Image (cartoon, grey):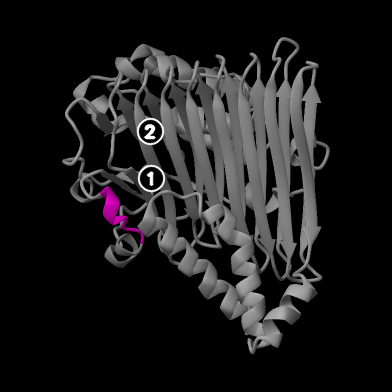
Amino acid sequence: MSSADETMAKHPFVARFIDQGRARSTEGLPQWWADFRTSALQRLVGLDVPGAKDEEWRFIRLASLAGEEFVAEFDADRQVNENELSEVTVPESAGARLVFSNGQFLPELSDTSALADEVTVTTWSQLREAGDLDEIHDYLDIADFWEDDLFYNLNGANFEDGAVIMVPRNEVVETPIHIVYLANGEGNDFAAHPRNIIVAGESAQVTVIEEFAGAGEGTYFHNVVDEISLGANAKVRHIKVQQDQTTAYHFARNVITLSQDSNYEGTAVNFGGQLSRNDSYARFDGKNIECTLDGLAYVQGRQVTDTHTAIDHALPDSTSYQLHKTIVDDRAHSVFNGKIFVRKDAQRIDSNQLNQNLVLSPRARVDTKPQLEIFADDVVCSHGATVGQLDDEQLFYLMSRGIDAERGQAILTYAFAAEVLETIGVDSLRERLEEQVLEVTSAVAE
């Protein structure tokens, strides 16, 4: 990229990330990774920070994020908060855990000893050090859905690390694999760009928990890309838990490519961040596929959560389900935009999408836009959205049984969230999240 090109970035926020991308070391990089980074940098030059005129961003404002000056993660302090790590421990994942802090891998706190030798659970940095990156080349940039997306390209230009999980054909991994991203905001305001690769070979099965947690009062930015590939008849359970500090920003792009007879079960739980955005794109590259994209967001104060999903039925005889729930309190703001595409030749599709929103404050805001685009005629598809408050009749019923109003409100709010939490098949994680929701709802009711 010439020096003239460098000055063409439309916004200082973008220009700073271009500079950071160009400053990153290429030592030990295979040519395909260097070329990928260069392409992302070149695309960034022509991109601007999205605003109100951009359809995919029209409900939220990025001025606060664009005004930040983040250092690269390798310039941030590499801190470990033992208490913070203990709070996100999943006992079922003993011996199957990767830990990152402020975007940097911590091998001393990671342990994959419970996993079979045939299962690869490692990181980009470890593969780079070993000179063994070529195996994952085919799983980088598996879809061009976000080719012109600013944040996807920020990741492409700047990612240094992330988890790499590869399960070979016919392998069933019983132990849930836990990827933990810790952040301590007490030092420099940093931006980390993790890129996670999850591959399940033919007839393989695996559960992956991806968790983000933060401590401290500083500001940081997690800008994440997950690329997930399922072989024929593979099954992946993927649980994402985002509990970054409410001073942080969290943006995620999830690309899911499904093959014949495969099954993807995704649950995204978003509690943290002052501004969070979670985008998922599921592409059906075969028949007889099942895909679930469930979600729960609970925001309060002045938090903003934005969820965009796209389920792309390109071939016939498949099903997809989506239940996304949000609880919005105080002056918080929730956005949901779910798209379902049924292509011309995708007959016999069964697809259901529902967005339900519980508003606990008159000052809270919800924007929801479920969408169906159907070009086939032999389908069963539905979509819908609801926005409402707690049911007065249900509250009255509880009060008539001796439960005070505050406790009744907490019970009803918890019951609203429980439908999504119950889908989490890892007992200790589900119970921890249920306890957190109960604590928050009880505190709010008081």
Left or right of 165? Residue 408 is right
Q: Residues within 10 Å of mark 1 (few under 14, many from 20)?
A: many
Question: In the image, residue 258 lies at what x, y percent?
Answer: 51, 21
**Kind of residue sitting beneath label 2:** Glu
Residue 61 as seen in the image, left or right of residue 431: right
Mark 1 and 2 residues: CB-CB less than 8 Å, in contact? yes
**Residue 90 in magenta?**
yes
Q: Measure how far apart labels 1 and 2 are at the Cα level.
A: 9 Å
- Nearer to the camera, 294 or 224: 294
- Looking at the image, residue 129 sits to the left or right of residue 87; the answer is left
Residue 212 highlighted magenta (yes or no): no
Numbered label attached to residue 103:
1
> What residue span does the magenta drawing correspond to?
88-93
Depth check: give the residue in front, 417 or 41: 417
> The residue tagged with tag 2: helix, strand or loop?
loop
Is residue 314 shown above or below 186? above
Classify residue 299 by image quadrant.
Answer: bottom right
Identify the image quadrant of the C terminus.
bottom right
Please give the residue where the numbered disc 2 appears in the rendered image.
160
**Residue located 43% across and 20% down the image:** 233
Residue situated in front as seen by the camera: 1 or 57: 57
Q: Name which residue lies at 36% across and 43% down.
A: 74
